[in-house]
Image (cartoon, rainbow, N blue to C red):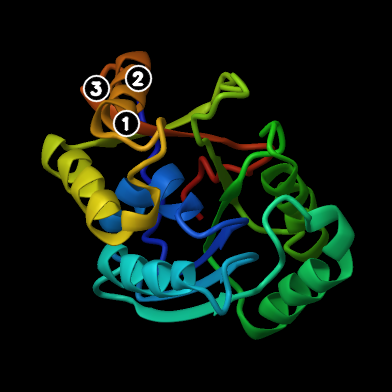
């Protein structure tokens, strides 16, 4: 499969509705990018043990970055009731940074918190490349992504190791296991002629074919 190789993404905005969303949906991509600065906003988990997990995890997934994290305390599953708080947080983040790339949930996600955050992103970041990551869940909402990031075997394994190391509160869940995480990356790898890949949904982008 032919690939476009963009310029290095030095500044990244990473958005999650819940602690662990970013690591599950784009953990291997974060490990690959090696961004200089990462501004992360997570809407829920603030003030709980989940916040501690998330802070440690994102430091591990972005080891070279100047990492700035904001973790709000919006209750899980209640984003529609806290719309203004989430919107204000995004607007404050937009005023503070002009990223080269945004990682966020995709708009077709069945979870209302994921979908709501995806809806808010273009209202604050109107002229930025956004990769919408996917998270497998019982809703059966896996779509047809249109952007693939091939992942070396070592990074796929590293992603799964870090997930289990940094999110002990989630290991009891039926979907939180090695087979699930590697399996999805394996399927997306097949779709782009690689062994492993993370896949994303891109709503709109421009390409510079003249190299100017």
Give coordinates of residue 130: x percent, y percent. Answer: 60, 50
Query: Which residue is at the front of the view, 4 or 194?
Result: 194
- For residue 3, what is the image quadrant? top left
Give coordinates of residue 61: x percent, y percent. Answer: 30, 62
Can you identify the residue that label 1 sits on?
Answer: 197
Q: Are marks 2 and 3 in contact (CB under 8 Å)?
A: yes
Left or right of 171 on screen, residue 146: right
**Residue at the outermost front position:** 172
Left or right of 90 on screen, residue 207: left
Can you identify the residue that label 2 sits on?
Answer: 192
**Residue at the outermost left position:** 154
Q: Residues within 10 Å of mark 1 (few under 14, many from 20)?
A: many
Can you identify the residue that label 3 sits on?
Answer: 194
Q: Residues within 10 Å of mark 3 (few under 14, many from 20)?
A: some
Q: Is residue 79 visible?
A: yes
Answer with mark 2 or mark 1, whichever residue precedes in sequence: 2
Report the Cα–Cα distance between label 2 and label 1.
8 Å
Left or right of 166 on screen, residue 206: right
Q: Residue at x 77, y 49 (%)?
A: 116
Report the Cα–Cα distance between label 1 and label 3.
7 Å
Q: Secondary structure at mark 1?
A: strand
Q: Secondary structure at mark 3?
A: loop
């Amino acid at each position: 499969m032919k690939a476009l190789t963009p310029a290095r993404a030095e500044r990244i905005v990473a958005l999650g509705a819940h602690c662990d969303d970013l690591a599950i949906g784009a953990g291997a991509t974060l490990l690959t990018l090696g961004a200089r600065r990462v501004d992360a906003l997570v809407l829920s988990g603030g003030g709980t043990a989940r916040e501690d997990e998330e802070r440690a995890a994102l430091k591990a997934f972005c080891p070279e970055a100047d990492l700035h994290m904001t973790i709000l305390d919006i209750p899980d599953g209640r984003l529609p009731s806290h719309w203004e708080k989430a919107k204000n947080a995004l607007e404050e983040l937009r005023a503070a940074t002009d990223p080269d790339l945004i990682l966020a949930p995709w708009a077709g996600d069945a979870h209302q918190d994921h979908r709501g955050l995806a809806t808010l992103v273009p209202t604050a970041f109107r002229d930025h490349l956004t990769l919408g990551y996917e998270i497998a869940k019982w809703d059966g909402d896996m779509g047809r992504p249109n952007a693939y990031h091939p992942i070396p075997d070592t990074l796929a394994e590293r992603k799964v190791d870090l997930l289990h190391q940094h999110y002990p509160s989630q290991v009891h869940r039926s979907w939180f296991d090695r087979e699930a995480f590697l399996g999805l990356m394996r399927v997306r790898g097949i779709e782009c002629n690689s062994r492993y890949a993370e896949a994303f949904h891109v709503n709109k982008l421009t390409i510079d074919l003249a190299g100017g």
